[in-house]
Amino acid sequence: MKIFKYALLVIPFLYFSCDDDDDTPDPVNEEEVITTMNVTLVAHDGSGTVFMSSVDNDGEGPNLPVVTVSGPISSMTSYSGMVEFLNELEDPAEDITEEVVEEADEHQVFFTASSGLPLEFAYVDEDSNGNPLGTQFVVAPTSEGATGSGTITITLVHEPEKPNDGLATAGGETDIEVTFEVVVE
């Protein structure tokens, strides 16, 4: 009988001391679906605007994206630039740029000009730690009047190492990468 009494006393302790293993895993931040990249370059001297766009209406389907550039970049002025990311598989289209800006610490846009293309890029916006984000930027000729043709590759990286020395050392996962054929004249 004594053993039965002790057993009854121990049962509540065992019951309340057990962990219900309610450890919830960290939420997984899924990679964004981006079908469209729009780039707007507004000339600082008021001479015009250059639009660049990549639209991939079937997402990861078999069709290649349609990539367009509205005209040449002037070698005589710098430009304020803005990148917009959209998921046009949704109706209405989902503005992924908002998510990129909200999660600035987890994203960075990289700009790569091919050799011989006389352009340089400077970041305007930054994350909460003062590291570059890249949805807003300035592009300028490396020297006034320098001309050439080549490519600009714009890459959005999710969870890059920050700070970094560019795309080669950033790590992370590429959300979208588009190469635009451009002329500087």
Image: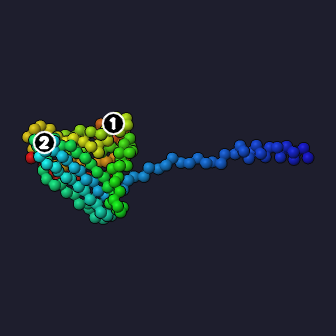
Q: Residue at x 28, y 60 (%)?
A: 56
Specify whether 135 is left or right of 73.
Answer: right
The residue lying toward the viewer, choosing from 182 and 84, is 84
Give the quarter of the image for residue 66. bottom left
Checking the image for residue 119, the label placed there is: none
Give x and y (percent) for residue 3: 88, 45
Q: Secondary structure at mark 1?
A: loop
* Crowding near the residue tagged with mark 2, few <14, some 14–19, many ≥20 C-alpha atoms within 10 Å: few
Going by the numbered disc 1, the residue's amino acid type is Asn
Which residue is under mark 2? 45
Give the quarter of the image for residue 109. top left
The residue lying toward the viewer, choosing from 140 and 150, is 140
Give me the C-alpha separation between circle 1 and circle 2: 28 Å
Q: Residue at x 35, y 45 (%)?
A: 101
* Crowding near the residue tagged with mark 1, few <14, some 14–19, many ≥20 C-alpha atoms within 10 Å: some
- Label 1 vs 2, first from the N-terminus: 2
Checking the image for residue 131, the label placed there is: 1
Give x and y (percent) for residue 60: 33, 61
Give x and y (percent) for residue 47: 11, 46
Task: From the image, state whether disc 1 or disc 2 is nearer to you.
Answer: 2
Specify whether 173 is left or right of 46.
Answer: right
For the residues labelled 1 and 2, say whether their Cβ atoms are less than 8 Å apart: no
Going by the numbered disc 2, the residue's amino acid type is Asp
Q: Secondary structure at mark 2?
A: loop
* Residue 172 is at least partly visible in this image: no
Specify whether 67 is left or right of 175.
Answer: left
Specify whether 31 is left or right of 124.
Answer: right
Q: Residue at x 19, y 47 (%)?
A: 41
